[in-house]
Image: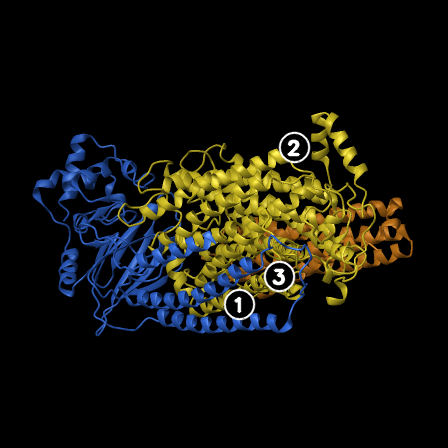
Amino acid sequence: MLGMAWRLLLFATTMTVLTTPNATAGGNGVVQTPSIFAPASTPAFAIRELALIVFGITGVIFVVVAGLTVYALMRFRRRRDDDGREPPQVYGSRQIELAWTVVPILIVVVLFLVTARYIFAIERRPHLPEALEVTIVGHQWWWEIRYPKLGIVTANELHVPVSDPAHPTPTFITLQSADVIHSFWIPQLAGKMDVIPNKTNRIWIDPQKPGGYVGQCAEYCGLQHAGMLLIVAVQSKEDFAKWAAQQQTPARHDAEVQAGRELFSSLSCINCHAVRGTSANGVFGPDLTHLMSRWTIGAGVIQNTPENIRSWIDDPASLKPGALMPAMKLSRDDLDKVTAYLLALR
Amino acid sequence: MSVLADTMASRRGAGAHRPLLAVLHEWVVTVDHKRLGVMYVVSGLVFLVVAGLEASAMRLQLAWSGLHVVPPGTFNQLFTMHGTTMVFLVGIPIVFGFGNYLVPLMIGARDLAFPRLNAFGFWIFLFGGLLLHFSFLGGEGLYGGGAAPAIGWFAYAPLTERAFTPGNATDYWNLALLVAGVGTIATAVNMVTTIATMRGPGMTLGRMPIFVWEILTISALTLIILPPLTAAQIMLLLDRFLGAHFFDTQAGASAVMWQHFFWFFGHPEVYILMLPGFGFASEIIPVFSRKVLFGYPMLVAASAGIGLVGMGTWAHHMFVVGMGSTLNAAFAASTMLVAVPTGVKIFNWLGTMYGGKIRFGTPMLFCCAFLFQFLCAGLTGIMLSVAPFDWQLSDSYFVVAHFHFMLVGALVFTIFAAIYYWFPKVTGRMLSERLGRWHFWLFVIGFNITFLTMHVPGMLGMPRRIYTYPADRGWEIWNLVVTLGLPLQIVGILIFVINIVISLRRGAPAGDDPWDAWTLEWATTSPPPAYNFDVVPVVSSRRPLWDLKHPDDPDGPHE
Amino acid sequence: MNERGRVGMIGLIVAETSLFAVFVVAYLFYIGKSLNGPYPKDVLELPIFNTVCLLSSSITIAVALRALRTGAARRAGVWLLLTIVLGAVFLAGTAREWYRLIVGHGLTIGTNLFGTTFYSLVGLHASHVIVGLAILILLCVFAFSGTLREHLERAEIASWYWHFVDGVWIVVFTVVYLVGR
């Protein structure tokens, strides 16, 4: 039937596209298409393996059952020269019905055993002292990222060192929520895990190739659920060490932006934001100590450029409608000063 | 078999001269199961159009990245209303509406056990549906723009707590469904009582049509699993209005508890929707294949099995919540287990078609598409039951594709089949086969373009419930194709509506039994008189009309 | 021969059982999880008298129906009245307990998880007692006017509802005052 052929064609095309890794890469080297079939970390590899097994089993079932259906529809359609008599009535068959119940049960048993094995294997975290520990707190609508042992606090970009399969250095992530339920999902690195208030969840990744991997919140969390993006930057051990060292330093204290810094400290900015080394230690909004070291602002919604920083401070809702930061309603002069200050927070 | 002339003549004659107000009054005060059944189905179809428009707006917004067809808040309201309307105001009323119309006829009864309770059930459902939609006009809500809820159709806590969702939008959702749910429970009580106590002479449980078995199963299920939703909604009401802390995580409560209660209802709910669809297929496929249903006892057992095991699968919606490996494995097991009786039904239908002489009338066309689409939906369901795979696919467009394949590709297609099949009985007129074929082909092609393609963005990492997406994720082309299936489906539905409107006036007269079928509803006139049967029918097999038409080879000895 | 009524009432009882079960599950799950007091063991006293009244009312209604079966409608009416009184005493006792908790201990539905689950579960039960009393009052009136004699089946089915309400109290009592304290 037309429908069947079309389905097969679409399926074949899809599988080709999906199993071709890394469809597009952005200008900054970040891999942009987060296909679950382009894994880069052990949990994602394991899931892909399991997926292919499952596709195999369900594929066979589909071909058999759909094939039988097509055959039945074609072979037993009423012919033009039909004599109008009713065909022989067959009420059932104990043996056939037993067979077609037992076989699926066996398939299910096998599938369950395979599944259980992968569940326990993936959720069991290897205990490794060299593992990096990160705590991620989900907020409406941004990600707070803390490295407790390194004393680093940042937002929306997770930097981790690459892991060598021979000597793994995974990253263990503790997930908490400051408000509603979110979900942490970087498809190429692992399955997702919900971020739930009053509950602590854990997930682990061990990315084996440097590069950028994207993801976003995967549990509807309110107005800007679509604007809660995430980038994971996987770096060589040296690059990560350099990045971490830089992040650990307190905020730069440039003389040229003194006016902006004073404005920032006197306005309500410090109620929500933290800038390490100054009086600002608000926790409602992202830590801004090294704001300019990040690629995006607004949790991935726009590029981190001077114009965008300026527009954001002026009226966040113009770039991310519903963002919980209010429009600061600064005069043009004040806006320039504060913007200059933030641009200096490298 | 039954007297045609008097009933038909009196109806036609009466319809020509009665004032509109008198006719409306009759329908408003009716307690006749047939009238109420029609009202349920018509209301459901109207809500289907409304929810379809909501879906169309969403698909236009998502056709490419960064579009501004609707503002973000409105989009969130659209997917909430779309899902809520489709499940509670389309699916439930249509399947119980068909149950209302057909069950007494199929078992040889005069009406349901509690006719006034039946009417109550309908009107409270309608009230709930109108209350929910009134929210669009209601006062302040989430960031303005009407007070329609924007919490998702499963309304996870604590997003639904007052702290995170001020205004009354959530309360519209809560109260409308609470009230409608009471009606559904009342109807379920009615159905169980009718089937248990009002079967005609000779109509043992083992001789009821499969559709009646399905209604019995879903009604029993409703009694057990709908009150938990009611309870959770009462809890949410108490939280929002009296400062209770059922889902207030700041006070130490569990956000996951809402999910457990909701899905304990939510998963069997989809079986409540789907089982009558199986019932439709089980009536239509035999008639159009000219063969008795293959393996009736196993089909009954399968329904019971689905009902029972289905109540133990709910947390497969929560694989990503962090329940721990043991619970994840347990629910993966129960979900895979329930796939067995569900899948076995396909084999029974295949066994029915085998050796038959299949006529491809419009009802059968929809059943054929149903078979393929249900197979796909079931298999993607098996994929999702594999918990680690679900850790990737949960909350992505893959799941959206899966459940639309089930609820549209399987359920709506069997509902279309049922409408084409029983319209002649309800109205006395045939629907146009020609328009039916146009409806079928446009809709099946459009449906597959949209929902088959939709699996792909899910596998490429696209989560659900997002009003837009970044331009460079590689999702745009797939979303465009998904949207392109829309116009075909819309035109298909339009043709369907036109078919109904035209055929009501000018359809070919149907007679008692246009399909040469075998169950009791075809033993009375089309439409049936108010009292259903002139003489209480006595049956001695599952196919009373087969016995009458083939006195030399009745079913009884073979069953 | 009122098959329909019996099956219908069983259906209703199944649904109501399911409704209560969820509140019981929530109660059990939240035991010990309140972040602040007052706590159950500080404020709850065993409502022995109340419980005896309510459970006795199951006996009195059974006696009433026995009387009705023999045609003694007036006697049935008296026993029904007794049932109503016992039910009303139970409600009054619940009201007194709530007054003591709210005014005396400052425990409201919004105080903590204990308050939330306690008032909702006990309150849900009490609301069903109120509905039951309304039904009993109707039965009582019809008994005294003599008409109930022809509706023995209906009275019996209504009494099932009352027995159900009493049965639920046994569960609530156990969960709230024994397990949870």
Q: Residues within 10 Å of mark 1 (few under 14, many from 20)?
A: many
Q: Quadrant of residue A40?
A: bottom left
Q: Which chain is yellow?
A: B
Colour in which chain C is drawn:
orange
Residue indicated by mark 2: B505
Depth-wise, is mark 1 or mark 2 nearer the camera? 2
Looking at the picture, which amino acid does disc 3 mark?
A: Thr
Instruction: Assess whether mark 2 and mark 1 are in contact (beta carbons under 8 angstroms).
Output: no
How far across and how far down the image is residue B270, in percent?
Answer: 55, 54
Colouring of the image: by chain
How far across and how far down the image is residue C148, in percent?
Answer: 86, 48
- Estimate the spatial distance between the alpha carbons at disc 1 and disc 2, rounded to whole Å: 49 Å
Mark 3 / mark 2, whichever is N-terminal: 3
Q: Nearer the viewer, residue A171 or C50?
A: A171
Residue B352, numbered label:
3
Residue indicated by mark 1: B337
Mark 1 / mark 2, whichever is N-terminal: 1
- In the picture provided, is B447 more to the left or to the right than B412? left
Are dots 1 and 3 on a single chain? yes
